[in-house]
Amino acid sequence: MNLQDHWRGRARYTVFDSDGSHVRAVIDAWRADPQRPARLHVVALTDALQPGFHRIPQDDRQVTLDLIAAPLDTALAELNAHPDFVYLHGAQGTAFVRPLARLTALGARLESHGLDDEQRAALAALGFVFDGDGATFATRKPRLPSTPEPDRRALVLGAGVAGCAAAARLCARGWQVTLVERHPQVATEASGNLAGIFMPLLSRDDNIPTRLTRAAYLYALRLWEQLGGVGRAFDGDQCGVLQLSRDAGHAAVSRAIAGDGTVTPDFARWLEPIEAEALLGLPAPDGGWLFPEGGWARPGSVCEAMLASCGDLLTRRFGAGDVRLEREGDEWIARGADGNAIGQAPTVVLASGAGARQMAQSADLPLQALRGQVTHLAPEHAPQLPLVLCREAYLTPSAHGVTCAGATYDLDADPQLRAASQEENVARLRGLVSDPQVAAGAPLAGRVGFRCVAPDRLPLVGRLPDFAAAGATERLRDVPRHPGLYGLLGYASRGLIWAPLGAELLAAQLEGEPMPLEMALVDALDPARFVLRARRNSRHPAPNATDIDS
């Protein structure tokens, strides 16, 4: 049975390719077949990218491509997809067999070449029935039921980068989205700064924040290019980011990362002091990392570009003021302060940042609002840089007559500009550029915003937990959830790059699609993690514990 015969009559179809050699042929065959499934998802292994999962946006919204840079058994262990067709070539050993059988859809076809007798026997023992070089998966073990087609109507609360990205990724799948915003326009609160920085993280142990930020950064760059590109589809510049080392010890760690050969120069390049100083025109005594594809963007313009991609599937309800949610039957109703309904849908996405703390259904989430004051400097008060410079602080190139420097991390709720925060930003700026006179006499100018931050500094992406009903729950999958209620929250200072991938992950969850991230990262972002942590902390309270690290 060939691929086209196998996918006939299906609404969606998933292909797993163990060496990536069939990707183009599969997509071309899908496009050429008038009886093709409505949606095609291809997951393929590759060795040509940064480590991890990579969702590659396609011009055809009905096609999704995931490339995974990992060994076969590692990729299968972290994959959340149920392939209907498997190309298996060049596999080593038998460690891949059990995770493949766990994932494969009942009735799926396997095409294999080069399997030895031990591998064929292991596959047969777990349900693959061979007929020549191919096999059909016919396990008798119970399988999870397929995800029913969702009712594609959603309310999204909040029109910052999180909410606008959610609207865009849902509309890309044909959802009708009502975007509710308390202010009259997009990006009025945390997303309202003139410039947001986009760059990845690096670490020796390639930890969860590093892996998440790398995946989000690369996905954002690809999605923005599809929208039209930084500086073209929206205001910004992919000018590069230079992250200076804090000290000699930090530089030594960075050299070790650069020396292990896992970081490609198009992603990040370590610059010794002489190279960094030549590029920057300023002192860089401990060198730094150059992220050549990084840069800055104005979040509000990114929001508008994402909403423009939604077309007539999007309804805007702006200037709505404070909103509360009520559940009636199988639907949520968003009501304004006057009690009138603003919108209604079976699915709600809370993307309102720190405002989610005021919603009854999300009030128990341990979110905190951190005040951030950005200083705006006229060109004569700041060095004119060819790229973004950062360390403990950041400095952008001048755009539209303004250079942005910042930002503070304050625990108070003062929304007004204040001189003390300006002085803090200027002091850090002077250390950054090694000039004690920079910004001398600059007037107080800038903006205050409030970042939404979780205790572990990771975003919250997924179904929101019902804390009151949690009981003695010990596992994420057993945590009770509010029906139809999801969150895109806790984006802290990285909302610009976390928002697109967070929205894509949420849309995949709603559609029952393969996840765009490895399951360890999906679990790390699950809002229900705080239910389990609350239980652990109640049994073993930590002395002098603090919610926010320094």
Image (spheres, rainbow, N blue to C red):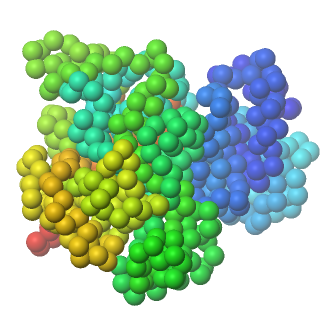
For residue 410, which quarter of the picture?
bottom left
**Is residue 109 rendered to the left or right of residue 11?**
right
Residue 432 appears in which quarter of the rendering? bottom left
In front: 409, or 27?
409
Please count the marks in the image: 0
Q: Is residue 340 left or right of residue 9?
A: left
The residue located at (58%, 58%) in the rendering is 52
**In percent of the image, x 78 and y 17: which residue is there?**
34
**Relative to 420, 54 lies left or right:** right
401 relative to 455, above or below = above
Q: Nearer the viewer, residue 519 or 427?
A: 427
Give residue 282's position: percent from left, percent from top. Answer: 41, 75
Farthest-out residue, right: 132
Q: Position of residue 84 (x, y in %)?
A: 70, 36
Q: Is residue 234 above or below residue 69?
A: above
Q: Is residue 535 shown above or below 34?
A: below
Nearer-the-camera pick, 471 or 202: 202
Give the residue at x 76% y 50%: 20
